[in-house]
Image: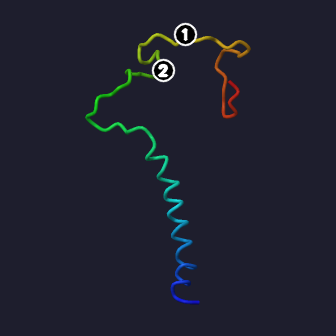
């Protein structure tokens, strides 16, 4: 086996594998929309969220109540709300 054959056999496959993995990792990052950079105008509506609307002196959420769920202080580590 010559030096060229040895290099092609032992060096080329790992280089191709590393290049393929690098392309697979970087391709989704390059295809996404551009990131927001400081100083650019914000194109979205302002959004304010709080987990405690009473503490922030905001009106309580008036979303639809799901029937069949008991009201009252329940919960716990198992998620029985």
Which residue position holds label 2? 52
Give the percent coordinates (x, y) of residue 28: 49, 46
User: At numbered mark 2, what does the secondary structure look like: helix, strand or loop?
Assistant: loop
Q: Residue at x 64, y 12 (%)?
A: 65
Looking at the image, residue 36 lies above or below residue 61:
below
Give the percent coordinates (x, y) of residue 62: 54, 10
Give the percent coordinates (x, y) of residue 80: 70, 27
* Image side of residue 67 versus residue 18, left or right: right
Give the percent coordinates (x, y) of residue 56: 41, 18
Mark nearest the camera among 2 and 1 is 1
Which residue occupies the foreground of this view, 75 or 3? 3
Q: Do tag 2 and tag 1 residues touch (Cβ < 8 Å)?
A: no
Which residue position holds label 1? 62
Q: Residue at x 55, y 71 (%)?
A: 14
Looking at the image, residue 80 lies above or below residue 24:
above
User: At numbered mark 1, what does the secondary structure look like: helix, strand or loop?
Assistant: loop
């Amino acid at each position: 086996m010559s030096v060229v054959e040895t290099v092609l056999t032992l060096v080329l496959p790992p280089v191709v594998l590393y290049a393929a993995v690098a392309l697979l990792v970087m391709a989704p990052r390059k295809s996404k929309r551009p990131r927001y950079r400081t100083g650019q105008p914000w194109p979205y509506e302002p959004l304010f969220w709080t987990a405690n609307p009473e503490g922030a002196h905001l009106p309580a959420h008036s979303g639809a109540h799901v029937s069949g769920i008991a009201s009252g202080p329940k919960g716990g580590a198992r998620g029985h709300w």
